[in-house]
Amino acid sequence: MIDGRATARYVRTSAQKAGLVMDLIRGQNVDLALSTLRFARKRIARDIEKVLRSAVANAQQKEGASGDVDRMFVSSCYADQGPSQKRVRPAPMGRAFQIIKRTAHLTVRVVERAEVVTRVAAAAPEDATKRARKTTTTRTARKTTARRGKKTTKPAAKKTATTVTAKRTKKSAKKSAAETSTDRV
């Protein structure tokens, strides 16, 4: 399992903003991740794209790597908080407001998926296939004779919407007749 890692340090953004874009590409194939970053509407997406390309190049340079980008995926990516620069902005009445300019360290790790090897089953001899056919035909014959020997019963009638509404109208007619008879007395 070949992997490649790349880190961009002191990138001028907050780790929280970078983490939002990193969540979009985590676990995706490299091609899909690159296209996602290309069309993401965040400024940090370009920096993350550079780091991802660098991680892919690092993985391809390792010994034993196939160099096939289609088999690579983003296994982990994260943004750590870097040092913050503190600046002072003049405020009214002789006061000062502090401005914090944050930085982040972006790390992307790509891993090459293992090749899927499928085992091809050996051809079965003709005698085995004949035996298999014979057993299946005898089973089906037993099932059909068992069905013929059983007594068939009529399935219960299904309730339809018309029968349900007819019953409702009968009940409402009985209720209205009962109400009218109590009113007369």
Image: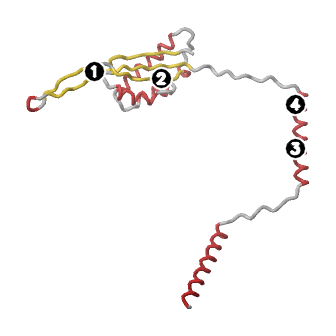
The tag earlier along the polypeptide, 1 or 2, is: 2
Marker disc for residue 150: none
Q: CA distance from mark 1 to mark 2?
A: 25 Å
Q: Are marks 3 and 2 in contact (CB under 8 Å)?
A: no
Amino acid type for the residue under numbered disc 2: Ser
Disc 1: CA contacts within 10 A as few (<14), some (14-19) or many (>=20): some
The tag earlier along the polypeptide, 2 or 4, is: 2
Location of residue 49 in the rendering, given as x and y in whole percent from the top left corner: 41, 23
- Where does label 1 land, which residue? 84
Q: Please tell me whether mark 4 or mark 3 is closer to you in this view.
A: 3
Residue in the image at 81% along x and 62% along y: 154
In the current view of this chain or complex, which residue is farthest to the left?
Answer: 93
Marker disc for residue 76: 2
The tag earlier along the polypeptide, 3 or 2, is: 2
The tag earlier along the polypeptide, 4 or 1, is: 1
| Element at label 4 | helix
Disc 3: CA contacts within 10 A as few (<14), some (14-19) or many (>=20): few
Q: CA distance from mark 4 to mark 3?
A: 17 Å
For residue 166, what is the image quadrant?
bottom right
The tag earlier along the polypeptide, 1 or 3, is: 1
For residue 78, what is the image quadrant?
top left
Q: Please tell me whether mark 2 or mark 4 is closer to you in this view.
A: 2
- Where does label 3 land, which residue? 140
Q: Please tell me whether mark 1 or mark 3 is closer to you in this view.
A: 1
Q: Please tell me whether mark 4 or mark 1 is closer to you in this view.
A: 1
Q: CA distance from mark 4 to mark 1?
A: 74 Å
Amino acid type for the residue under numbered disc 1: Ser
Amino acid type for the residue under numbered disc 3: Thr
- Where does label 4 land, which residue? 129
